[in-house]
Structure formats: C-alpha cells, structure tokens
Amino acid sequence: MILKKIYTDLLLNIGFSENEIQQNWSNLEKAYSKKSRHYHNLTHLKEMIESFEMYRDRIQNPDEILFAIFYHDVVYSASKKDNELKSAEFALSILNENHLLNKQLVFDAICATQLHAYNANEDINWLIDFDLKILAKDWEDYKIYFEEIRKEYRIYPDFLYKPGRAKALKHFLEYEFIFQTDEFRGLYEEKARRNIEKEISYLERKK
C-alpha cells in the first residue's frame, strides 16, 4: 500500500492542487515520522486504511472518513490530553470552502477517537473500530503494540504509567461493547477483551 498515492488521490478528488498536496503530504509525513512516535505513526495509518479499504462500501461518506484517518493523530503528545481536538482543528485548518468535504463530519470523527464511544453517526463508528482493531491482534503482536505505547509514554516512571494504563484499559472493559459496529463485534470483541485482561494482569504483576 502506497500511502502517498491514496492521500494524493483523495486530495485531488476533493479539490486540492498538486502543489498543495505535495506540501500537505510533506507536513503529514513529518508529523507521523517523529522519533517520539513508536505506535502512532505511518504504520498505524496504513493498518487503519487497510481496514477502511475493506469496508469502504459500507461507509456513507468515505472521503470524509479517509481524510479523518489521515489526520486523526497528526497532533500527538503523550503528555497532552487534547491531541484529538488539536488534530481535528489542524485537519480543518487545511480545508477551505472550495474543498468538497463535510467539515463537521471530519471534525466530529477525529474528536470521537478520544473516547471511542458509540456514535449516532455510523460512519464514525467505523472509524472508531478501525482505530481499535489493534486490540484484537494475536497476543505477540498485541504485546508489541503495548510495548510501543509504553515507549511513547517513557517520560512517565512505571509507578505512574502502570496504574494509569491499567485504568484506561479497565475503562474499555466497562463498556458494553469495545467495538461499535456489528461486524467488528462479531470478529474481534472477544479477542480484544482477552488481550486487555491479559495486559492488565501483566501490568499488575510487574508492579
């Protein structure tokens, strides 16, 4: 999968010039390639877009959701709690009235990746599920994922990080469902819950 080509085709389709696309891609690639990013990087984008391509025909507003995927983590700092809002604002900042996108949907979709809770808009539920699909990987791959997250939070010592991470994971288990679409619930819900429970045990054992 060539991310730049998918990005270029999308932006051409919604009214950007080739020069604008080149500059915007350069900025996007730079943001996702920072050394501090061990998980929230271009590989994460690629995996989300693979899911998007698989379910594109189920999405009512595919251009908006694809654009939201590209920008949902463009602003990311482990020490900040407003990454999603800042990413949504950044995404809208490169759009003008001539671009053929529902800007409110883009904004709402990116913001929804903060809580990953059920949304009245089904397109946004697909985006949430694409973002969380990592939770249902085989254990060895899931372990790599949570080790990458730990590296992103390396500014925090274990005595702060571990209870904070465990609390966030337990929050997922408190939801009636982790995944918001019937499709992903059927495929991934049980495995994701098992992985999360196993990671919580891992965190508490390592204290």
Image: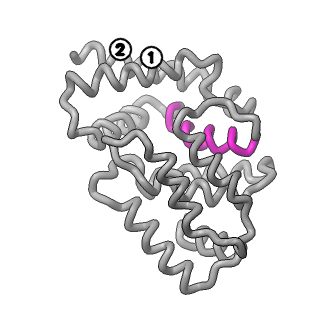
In this view, 47 is above or below 164 = below
Which residue is painted at 53% across and 56% down in the image?
A: 89
Q: Is the Cβ of the residue at disc 1 closer than 8 Å to that at disc 2?
A: yes
Write down the residue under mark 1. 197
- Range drawn in magenta: 122-135
The N terminus, quarter of image: bottom right
Residue 145 or 168: which is nearer the viewer?
168
Which residue is painted at 73% across and 59% down in the image?
A: 102
Residue 181 on the magenta span:
no
Residue 35's quadrant in the figure? bottom left
Residue 53 visible in image: no
Residue 124 or 46: which is nearer the viewer?
124
In this view, 14 is above or below 77 = below
Distance from the alpha carbon under mark 1 to that under mark 2: 6 Å
Residue 100's quadrant in the figure? bottom right
Which residue is painted at 72% across and 33% down in the image?
A: 181
Residue 61 or 48: which is nearer the viewer?
61
Q: Position of residue 183 (x, y in %)?
A: 73, 33
Q: Main secondary structure of the magenta part?
A: helix
Write down the residue under mark 2. 201
Q: Amino acid at mark 1?
A: Glu
Q: Secondary structure at mark 1?
A: helix
In this view, 121 is above or below 169 = below
Q: Amino acid at mark 2?
A: Ser
Residue 124 on the magenta span:
yes
Judging from the image, the colouring scheme is one colour
